[in-house]
Image: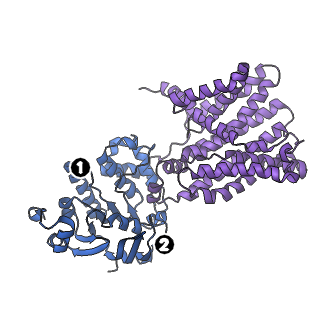
Amino acid sequence: MSALLQVNQLDKHFGGLHVLKNFNMELHKGEIVGILGPNGAGKTTLFNLLTGFIPADSGEVLLRGQPIRQLKANTIVGLGMARTFQLCRPFVGLTVLENVLVGSLGPRVKTHDIGARAMHLLAQVGLADKAQQASELLSYGDLRRLEIARALATEPELLLLDEPFAGLGSSEIEALSVLIRQLHSEQHLTILLIEHKLREFMQLVSRVVAIDFGEIIAEGSPADIVKDPRVIEAYIGKQNPLNLDNHA
Amino acid sequence: MKAFKGLDTLSSIGGLVALLLLGVLPTLFTGTYLVGVLTVAAIYGIWAVSWDFMSGLTGRENFGHSLFIGVGAYAAGFLNVHFGLGPWWSLPASMLVAMVFAVVLGFPTLRLKGPYFALAMLSSAVIMQRLMLIFWEYTGGEEGIHDITPLIVNPLHYYWFVLAVLGCITLLLSWMARSRWGLILRAIRGDEATCLAAGLPITTYKIVSLVISAAFAGLGGALYAHYQLQVSPQLFAVVTSITIITMVYVGGMGTIFGAVGGALLLTVMTEGLRNFGEWRLMVYSLLLIFILFFLPNGIIAPIWQKIRNLGRPS
């Protein structure tokens, strides 16, 4: 089975800082994979490189075998890879519904009735009753849902979520986890996500790629990753405060 | 479910009534003074509404709108006086010339971030004004081009014509602003990166919007040239762009019809303040500061919103 997304030898410097070193990764259709790593490990940079928001120095990114590294960010969305932002970026001055509608105006969207679809997406993420509100007035948790609804409106095949749980309370995290699982199981989306909230993260993903200083330090099932000494050292410290045995 | 509402009946009726009132107004008074003031006001309305379509919706403020006005007016002058073409040719020609300038300027400048687009457009207008003086053999220098033939000789009829053009442009741009196109422009104003994440080619949308905006500014320039019957480098003046921007702010930015209201209001206000003599500019400035400070959404758009809400159960 060929990979939906394949990353070969992707490399990026910010000035003298080598933020991503010969990064290799494969993502298959239907997978839900997590990128794990401490702050500054290069997770968001990886997302920005994959989605064309910043140019890579060298390497190759293939989506369904098609090279996309040189393509513009908006073109890549048109090929079926959508993303959310770590810091929510709603369209200020637009209503919640309009925010989602904008996502439906891209080249990939085949839906005829984008209004109905936008409402359907809002209902799916639990924002239907706030459709006519100004988006900048939403709570942090609602903004995250809006980000996801907007990304879904582009009708992606592969969804990249940049720290979807950041800044959320535990009940909000739970609800969002349910939503992500639904997207994966019911709509057959392939999902790549970055996260810090370890417990929820580990329950959600089927495979983890742990990175530090722009390099992959471990790769495997969540259960294996939390036992990997390099991961524990890089991400968690010398001892294991995770206590994941109860959950994993 | 309809994703875009389009023009609602109430707005269309309101616009039509306003247009009719403006058309009838000068017939109630004798003399041509009021016709002149209103003609200029309507031309400013065309400039303001065209500015609002691009800059009001996307938030990319164009401080060089006078450039498109100027090239449109000069295109009219050149064709009419130097090439002896009939005055009606000015209308398509001025739009075309302004559109060419918008493409040439828009490609490099609309990729710029922050205030650089505004600065680049401002400088371009200043450069064009200087070029008119440098190439005085062709442009007539400070004197400009004289003896342009009028489009319509009767001032009242010409005013009606300009008013009709203003009405058509406002209708078209209002409709566009409420379509998917307008939503994308407002989204660009919100966040460009998110637009890219939505798969939208934002530079294309910005350039095409600037081209549309320029076309109508140029058309307004030609209408002005055929009203004044002369063009001069003063048309490129930065103060014209600033005046237009002020009109849009006073009317209500990004609302299209508000820009027309702002243009009419400020032109009439400028005339009305003639009684203040040398204090005129000061009173004008104070009024503007008052409006911008206390009514940040402008005057015209919020008033219209109030009127609309009257008919609705709260």
How far apart are the alpha carbons under marks 2 and 1? 37 Å
Q: Is residue A69 above or below residue B62?
A: below
Q: Chain of mark 1?
A: A
Would you identify the image quadrant in which residue A195 lies?
bottom left
**Residue B153 percent across, percent down from the top left:** 87, 35
Give the labeled residue for mark 2. Answer: A70
Q: Is residue A81 among the parts visible in the rendering?
A: yes
Identify the secondary structure beneath mark 2: loop
Q: Is residue B294 above or below residue B61?
A: above
The amino acid at mark 1 is Glu
Give the labeled residue for mark 1. Answer: A172
Identify the secondary structure beneath mark 1: helix
Q: Is residue A236 above or below residue A59?
A: above
In the image, is A55 to the left or to the right of B219? left
Q: Chain of mark 2?
A: A
Pick whichever of labels 2 and 1 is earlier in the sequence. Answer: 2
In the image, is B269 to the left or to the right of B258? right
Q: Nearer the viewer, residue B282 or A31?
A: B282
* Labels 2, 1: front one: 2
Q: Residue at x 75, y 37 (%)?
A: B162
Q: Is residue B212 among the parts visible in the rendering?
A: no
The amino acid at mark 2 is Gln
Q: Nearer the viewer, residue A3 or B75?
A: B75
In the image, is B132 to the left or to the right of A173? right
Q: Residue at x 87, y 42 (%)?
A: B148
**Residue A116 percent across, percent down from the top left:** 41, 49
**Residue B216 percent across, percent down from the top left:** 69, 46
Dot 2, how many residues are within 10 Å of its Cα: few (below 14), some (14-19), or many (20+)? few
**Residue B111 percent across, percent down from the top left:** 56, 58
Chain A palette colour: blue
Q: In the figure, the purple chain has which letter?
A: B
